Image: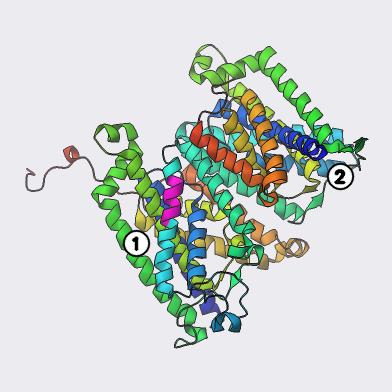
Amino acid sequence: MALATFFVGLLTLALIYGVLTLGLHVQFGLAGMLNFGHVAFFAVGAFTSALLSLPPKGSEAYLAAGGQYQLGYGLPVPLAFLAAGLAGGLVALLIGSTSVRLGSHYLAVATFAMAEILRSVLTNETWLTRGQFGISGVPQPLRSNPIPAELYPFAYLAATVVVVALLLAVSVRLTSSPFGRALRAVREDETAARALGKPAPGLKLRAFALGGVLAGFAGSLWTHSLGIVHVGQFVPIITFQVWLALLLGGRGNPIGAVVGALVLMAITESTRFLGNIPFLEPLTRRNPSFVPSLRFVVVGLLLILVVRYFPRGLLPERLRRPPADEPAPGRQP
Amino acid sequence: MTAFLQTLIFGLGTGAVISVGAVGLSLSYGVTRFINFSYGELLTLGAYLAFVAVSLGLSLPVASLLAMVVVGLIGVVLARLLFDPILHRGFLSLLVTSVGLAFVLQNAVRMIFGSSPTRFPLPPLRPWRIGALIVPKVPVLVIVIAALAMACVHLLLRYTRMGKMMRATSDDAALAKASGIVTGRVLATTWFLSAAIAALGGVLLGMTQIALQPVMGWGFLLVVFAAVLLGGIGNPYGAMLGALIVGLGIEFGAAYLAPDYGHAFAFLLLVLVLLLRPKGLLRGSF
């Protein structure tokens, strides 16, 4: 049972990463924007959802849980979930409206820097986030009543599957929609797309905001699955794990994005067991951060190897061939 | 007034450390045209290698020089293995590869030395007292060393044959090649120089921060980016100017505006520069 719960938790986490990766799919996979600060939208979603759903300060539930945070609005979790997406989108709109015009290098550095600014704000503004202490007791809807606590991870996984399937379906539609095609045109050649009348900056901004919405949703799913929210969770490596998931799965393919996240999680979580290998044991005993560090070495190596030898990913983008190559149906000799 | 002067000294010291990193990063950008996210880890490597050499009984200056040479060679090898083969693939591949390399190096250091901070082996230096003003020796020492290093880079770029070849390659790699410059050798030299300078930056960073941590270089990277972009990317002279502004910005911002946000001021400065003047203060190449 404990093992099953462990795997269920892992699968939930992997699916949440899948939603984050879908966000990057829209921003980079479709629109070609180098967002190196994706974790910021994830953090905004998580904190928004947590603070909106927590019982208000001074209420009975607050006192019963021994709450120590300042803000709480006691909204129902589904509403908080929607608000998290909205908040992620708004922050992305704000960041994007200043920087989508930047060249790709500069965009990468600017988004990376803005994510760090946000992290520094979340760390220092303790009235909002309790800084290094984090906030526990984030509501987990229906837990204990009526769903027993030991079955809760399974129920949460089921709910996550439904949400992810829905978001994936929307992303698939979006990818093949005229909007998705226009984004790909901008990605391939911005000048040509503009010459054809596509408003490139506006399209990119919308794609950036949409990616932020998806990351905000992911943040909400994540905070309610754990029941805590803590600024230390939102470090830059999250951004690059999402990048790795996207590149592994295949850029430009939304199904690939989710598959990439699942595969990535399987790989990184299996490093957890490296500590049990006998000859590594003396090393891990001397240095407790040996195995966690090894995991990030694996992530780094995978990034390097995937880019070098496997640039198209597991499920490469499917592009429609130009009509000239494709004999019209019924006209074949 | 004394508080102001003290902040000024610390700001210049911080600026000096940043300028060393920024010049090194600019050199590699000038020749390869991508922003190297693994550059911070070369600083970390330099600091830790100097620490190891000192623990083996060498004096700090000798240990630092040794660390510079070793990290320089490591830089050349890493570039040969990882970056040179994909230079033609566009910068997404290069950027992501450099991020991957950053995680590998940073966590390799953590696997060897552990996450807890290590004290940098700096002999205790008593500050100078000039009236009410207390002048700590470390920032002054750091400023002098950084200025010397900058002067060396300047002389190298301006007056040596290799420096001229580096500038030519940075201006136009294809033209340089057509004029008979062996760009491969120039590339390797640039990587060596850039990595060696990173190691020096790491030692100076260790001196100012007193403690070494596996994340020190990664955390410092954004500050270096800010300086590099502020000064005009790929231009070492711009990088020096940018570093000075960022260093003063961090120290004065922390002293007079909000003490918890020291580095955030650098990032804010970075974002503002990107938005208002994306080509930097001194645009163009060296």
What's the residue type where badge 2 is placed? Answer: Pro
Front one among A224 and A262: A224
Q: Is residue A260 above or below residue B201?
A: below
Residue drawn at 37 percent across, 54 percent down: A210
Q: Quadrant of residue B19?
A: top right
Q: Which residues are magenta?
A: A89-96
Q: Residues within 10 Å of mark 1 (few under 14, many from 20)?
A: some
Report if residue A209 lies within the magenta region.
Answer: no
| Distance of label 2 from label 1 (alpha carbons) | 54 Å
Q: Is residue B162 above or below residue B267?
A: above
In this orientation, does residue A325 appear? yes
In this orientation, does residue B195 appear? no
Contact, CB < 8 Å: mark 2 with mark 1? Answer: no
Q: Quadrant of residue A203?
A: top left
**Apparent side of residue A10 relative to residue A188 in the rendered image (left or right):** right
Residue drawn at 81 percent across, 28 percent down: B144
Q: Which residue is mark 2?
A: B121
Residue A297 in the image, given as x and y percentages of width and height:
62, 53
Q: Chain of mark 2?
A: B
Q: Which residue is mark 1?
A: A168
Front one among B215 and B192: B215
Residue A224 in the image, given as x and y percentages of width and height:
49, 72
**Apparent side of residue B49 relative to residue A162 in the rendered image (left or right):** right
